[in-house]
Amino acid sequence: MEFFIAQVLNGLSLGSIYVLLVTGFNLMLLVAKIIQFAYPQFVVISMYATWAVLRATNNVILAILVTIVVSIFLNLLSEPIFRRITSIKGTDINATFVASIGLSMVLVEIMSHSLNQGFPISFSDNWVGGSVFRYGIINISRSSIFAWVGGIIVVVAFFYLLYRTMVGRLFRAIAENRHVAKLFGIPIFKTSIMSYLIAGLLGGFIALLLSMLIGTASPWLGESVALKVLAVSIVAGLGNLKGGLFVGLALGVVESVAIGYVAGSWSNVIAFVIMLIVILAKPKGLFGAAVE
Amino acid sequence: MSSTLMYFLGFSMTYILMAWSIYLPYRVKHLHFLAVATMAVTSYMGGILSVNFGWSFLPTLLLSIVIGALISYLISHTIGNAPTFTVVIVGITFVFIIKTAIENTDYLGGTIGLFGIPVLDHPLIILFAFLLVIGYFLYRIDHSRIGRAASVIFTDENLAKSMGIKPKQIGMLFQTISGGIAGSAGVFYAFFVGSLFPDFFTFHLIGTLMTILFIGGYTTMWGVIPAALILRGVPMILPSSIASWRLLIYGVLLVAIIATKPKGLITKKMLWELLKKRSGS
C-alpha cells in the first residue's frame, strides 16, 4: 500500500505538469485557433536555457528569468507564422497542426544536432532538490512540492484571469465565436498576441517545474510529451479547459502507478492503451469538445 | 543498375504507396496515421512468415493487404467519422504501442531487429507494376461518385449530409483501403530491405509522410509522386553531412509551404488548367 501511495504522489506531481501543458495548449487552441503541437518543444528548449544559464552562472534567479523570457520569445516568434496560415482563405485548423509538426521537426533537429552535441542534459542535484519528507518508502521531494504548489497557483491564477478579468472575458468571447467577437469590436490580433504571451509565460513555468521534477531533458522529450498533451486534450474534449485538469492529473497518476508495477517500456504503453480505449469509446472526448 | 539508384527508386516507390495510403483518407479530412502502424504490423508479419515459415512473397503480400484492411476496417467503426485530431491521435498511439510491443518481443527481434528476410529478385519491376495498379485504382476512386462525395465532405460535412452522402461510410471505406495499401507497403518494404528495425516506425516516418503529402499537394493523388522522389530519394544521394539535416529541411519546407501554398505545390486546379491548355492548343 505504501508503494502505491508513493506512486500516486509521484503521479500527482507529473499530472500537475500535464495539466499546465494542456492548459497552455488549450489556451492557444481556443483563442488563437491553432493546434500548437510544437508547444512542448518550446518547453524543452526553455529547459535547455535553464540548464545553460545554471551551468554558466549558477545563478538561480537569472536562470528563472531567462527560461521564462526564452519561452515567451519562442511562442511570440511562432505567432506570425500561424497568423499568416490562419489568414489564408480556405485554410482550417488542420493546416496549423501540420505547420506545428513542421516546426516541431525543426526544433528537434536543432536540439539533436547543436545543443549539448545532441546528448541529453542533466540538472544538478541542487536544482532538482532532495527529500523534504520521508515515511517508509513514501518520499516527498522538494521538486514534487514545487510541482503541486506551482501547479495549483498557476491553474488558480489562470482561471482567475479567464473568469474574473477583462482579458479573460475577451479570451472567452473569441473562443465562443471569433466572428461575432470581431463584430463587437474585440481586438482579435491583440488578444491573440496576449494568448501567445500567456502561453509562453506558462511554458516558462512548466520548463522550470519539469526540469526540477525529472532532472533531465533530451531533444526527443518534446515529442512524447506533445503526443501526451494532444491525447489528454482529446480525451478531455478538444479545448475543454476543465476536462483537461482532470484528465491531465489522471494521466500522471496512471503513468506513475504503471511505472511502479510494470517493467520496462511497457509501463508507458499502459497509459496510452487506456487513453486509446477512451478515445475509441468516446471520439469527441469525455467532457465534450469546445472546438470541432 | 547501381545499388544507390535501386535504393533511391525502391524507397521512393514504397513512400509513394504509403503517402497514397494517407492521401486517400485525407480526402475526407482524416489524417490516418494508423497506416504507419499497419505498415509496421504487416512488415513484421511478412518477415516472420518468410523467415520462420518459408512463405513466398505473393501469398504474404495478399495476406498483408487483407490483414491491413481488416485492422483499419475494425478501427474505422469508431473513427470512421471522428474529428480529424481524434483520427490523428488514434493513429499515433497505435504506432507507439506497436513499436513498444515489437521492441519487447524477442520473437520479433526486439530492439536488435529482424534479419534474413529474403530479398526479391526484381523488386523494382514488381513494385512499379503494383504502384501502377494501386495508382489506377485510386484514380478510379477519385473520379467516381464516391470521390466526388468525398470532395463535398472535405468542403462541408453538413452540406454533404444534406445531400444524402454518408460521411461515416465513406470514411470507413477510405480508411479500410488505406489499411490495405499500407499493409502492402509493409511487405514490399520488408522484402526490399531484407531487415526490419522498430526504430523505423516512429514519429520521423509520420513526419516524412506528412511532408510528402502536404508539400506534394493533398488535393490530387499525383502530388506525392514528385514529392516522394525529391524528398525521400534525393537525400540518399546527398553527402551524409547534408543528408543528416534531412528532417530539419523537411520541417522548414513544410512550414513554408503551409504558409504560402497550403494546398501543396501540385493542386487539382493546376492540373486541370494544364490539361485544358494542352487540349486547347
Image (tube, rainbow, N blue to C red):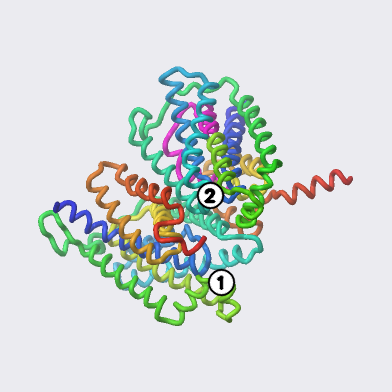
Place of residue A132 in the rendered image (x, y in percent of width and height, measured from the top left) = 16, 64
Place of residue A202 in the rendered image (x, y in percent of width and height, measured from the top left) = 39, 69
Q: Does residue A268 appear in the picture of this structure?
A: yes
As drawn, the residue found furthest toward the top would be B54
Place of residue B136 in the rendered image (x, y in percent of width and height, measured from the top left) = 68, 34
Residue under numbered circle 2: B81
Magenta stretch encompasses residue B162? no
Q: Does residue B264 appear in the picture of this structure?
A: no
Question: Are the residues tagged 2 and 1 within 8 Å (C-beta)?
Answer: no
Q: Is residue B271 left or right of residue B188?
A: right
Q: CA distance from mark 2 to mark 1?
A: 25 Å
Residue drawn at the location 30% of the way across and 56% of the way down: A252
Amino acid type of the residue tagged 1 in the rendering: Arg
Q: Is residue B94 left or right of residue B171?
A: left
- As helix, strand or loop, the secondary structure at mark 2 comes to loop
Which of A139/A165 is in front? A165
- As helix, strand or loop, the secondary structure at mark 1 comes to helix
Using the image, name the chain to which the residue with label 1 belongs.
A
For disc 2, the neighbor class at 10 Å (few under 14, some 14 to 19, many from 20) is many
Which of A110/A197 is in front? A197
Residue drawn at the location 52% of the way across and 23% of the way down: B119
For disc 1, the neighbor class at 10 Å (few under 14, some 14 to 19, many from 20) is some
Residue under numbered circle 1: A178
Secondary structure, magenta segment, majority class: helix
Disc 2 and disc 1 on one polypeptide chain: no
Q: Is residue A154 left or right of residue B74?
A: left
Place of residue A56 in the rendered image (x, y in percent of width and height, measured from the top left) = 33, 65
Magenta stretch encompasses residue B202? yes
Q: Which residues are magenta?
A: B183-211
Which of A225/B219 is in front? B219
